Image (spheres, rainbow, N blue to C red):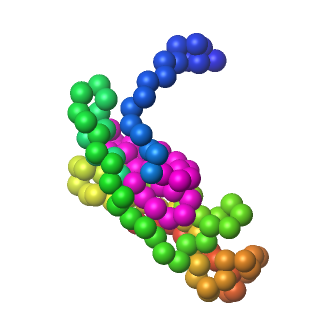
Amino acid sequence: PSFIADFDEEFLISLEDADSPVDIQFSPDFTLMMVPEKDGKLWIVENFDPVGGLVPRKTEALQMTKICTNVERGFGGTAFHPRFGVDNRWIYLYYTYDKNNDCNTSGSAKRGPVNRLSR
């Protein structure tokens, strides 16, 4: 694809505190960035506007508990509501919840973990 030839790598912010980031999502106005980690931690980067010259500020916003992280389980991703910042502040979190205190069981929501989408 032609966009690869035009790619220009530019360092924007260090995520060295993030052990295993799984996703990056930008708010509709591009001033916030969410970075979830597999283990349930959520980083929020404020003032994310490299073009406008603002200095980004990274904050650990959330550490989920009762999350399964074995195999491919864990904090799967995040999303901003399309009208985030206009008439709501909703974000969506997708993760594997340890509903029955057994992350090793699979195949049954009655015994093992379940995938959740929360707002």
Q: Residue furthest front?
A: 16
Image height of 58 relative to 74, above or below: above
Percent coordinates x, y for residue 45 in the rendering: 34, 47
Image height of 40 relative to 83, above or below: below
Horizontal side of 52 relative to 24 (left or right) equals: left
Q: How many marks?
A: 0
Horizontal side of 100 relative to 92 (left or right) equals: right
Q: Nearer the viewer, residue 58 or 36?
A: 58
The answer to whether residue 76 is seen in the rendering is: yes
Q: Is 35 one of the magenta-colored residues?
A: yes
Q: Is 90 one of the magenta-colored residues?
A: no
Q: Nearer the viewer, residue 99 or 20?
A: 20
Residue at 76% across / 76% down in the picture?
A: 107
Percent coordinates x, y for residue 38 in the rendering: 56, 59
Which range is magenta?
A: 18-43
Image height of 76 relative to 96, above or below: above
Residue at 62% across / 67% down in the picture?
A: 69
Quick one: quadrant of the C terminus?
bottom left
Quarter occupied by residue 97: bottom right
Residue at 63% across / 18% down in the picture?
A: 1
The answer to whether residue 81 is seen in the rendering is: no
Percent coordinates x, y for residue 73 in the rendering: 65, 64
Percent coordinates x, y for residue 105 in the rendering: 74, 79
Horizontal side of 66 relative to 51 (left or right) equals: right
Magenta stretch: helix, strand or loop mostly = loop
Q: Nearer the viewer, residue 116 or 11?
A: 11
